Amino acid sequence: MNWLQQILENKRAEIAQRKQSVSIGSMRMKAERGDLVPPFEQTLRSVPVGLIAEVKRKSPSAGVIREPFDPIEIVAAYEKAGANAISVLMDERFFGGSEKDLRAIRKATNLPLLYKEFVIDEWQIWHARFLGASAVLFIVAALDDATLKKFLHACREARMEALVEVHNEAEAKRAVAAGSKIIGVNNRDLKTFQTSLEVTEKVARLIPRSTLLVSESGIKTPDDVMRVRNAGAGAVLVGESLLRQSDLAEAVRFLMSSVWAPA
């Protein structure tokens, strides 16, 4: 069994249990009472290349990434350095994420937040809205076409945006056909967790110019940022390579130095 299959199997059991405690109807009612959230795509497009900086404790491939781990301190450094949005890992078992982290981060920043989760149920979309997220991650490899379209519709109903993640050309075609406005190209193979920026270069050719293309994973240097920008990316999602640095703000400034003007 590959990593994605293991994570999805665990997620199905987790969400089934959570829905027993709070029904989707109750979650939706709570979410609809929430305030408007900051725009995700518009904020990312406000600079030559937008940065979605990630908050992540660990991963199946890398193990513990940052210790000690203080989400509020991390987000403060990201925001100080000019990050445009924050990605918050929600999965607890495999990535060390939690609802508690997203709640705390929402209180600490006005930046758009991405609910980065393995979404397999509409309940999670309304949960994201309830917590104050601006956008939700949908992984094409985990969803059939009908479900993807259904989730995109639910996202619009919840007044949020969707980052639709693909890993190859076939998935990119499905994402485009579903009407995705923001498409993330994950350079990491979720079966092996190996990364290659060539994935963005190959897939970008299939993405309409009007669609915001986000390159995710394996981005470590200013040259990497410039490389994916030249391929067509309007934003990057970066976590591990930043989180391993002692000075997070300086790490952000250095990473984006090839595309951001000096402050």
Image (spheres, grey):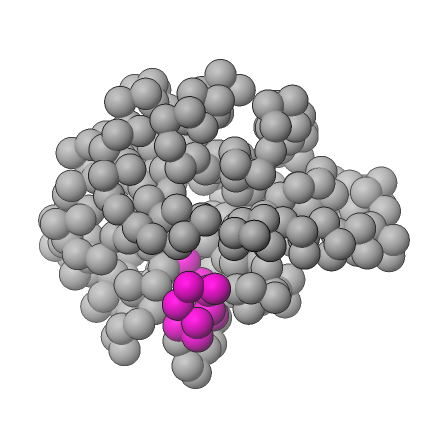
Is 156 left or right of 237, judged from the image as shown?
right
The residue under the point 52% across, 52% down is: 2
Residue 149 percent coordinates (x, y) = 61, 23
Quadrant of res 76: bottom left
Which residue reaches farthest bottom?
68
The C terminus, quarter of image: bottom left
Q: Is residue 237 visible?
A: no
Any part of residue 63 in sight: yes
Residue 161 placement (x, y as % from top left): 53, 34
Q: Is residue 135 left or right of residue 258?
A: right
Q: Is residue 215 above or below residue 78?
A: above
Quadrant of residue 259 within the rendered picture: top left
Point 41% across, 81% down: residue: 67
- In the rendering, at what x and y percent does residue 99 appear? 64, 62
- Residue located at (45% from left, 37% from top): 165
Quadrant of the image occupied by residue 17: bottom right
Looking at the image, residue 242 sits to the left or right of residue 130; the answer is left
Q: Is residue 64 magenta?
A: yes
Is 132 located above or below residue 61 in the figure?
above
Front in this rendered view, residue 220 or 257: 220
Please tell me which residue is depicted at 36% across the width and 48% down the height of the picture: 188
The stretch of residues the image draws in magenta is 54-65
Q: Is residue 241 inside the magenta stretch?
A: no
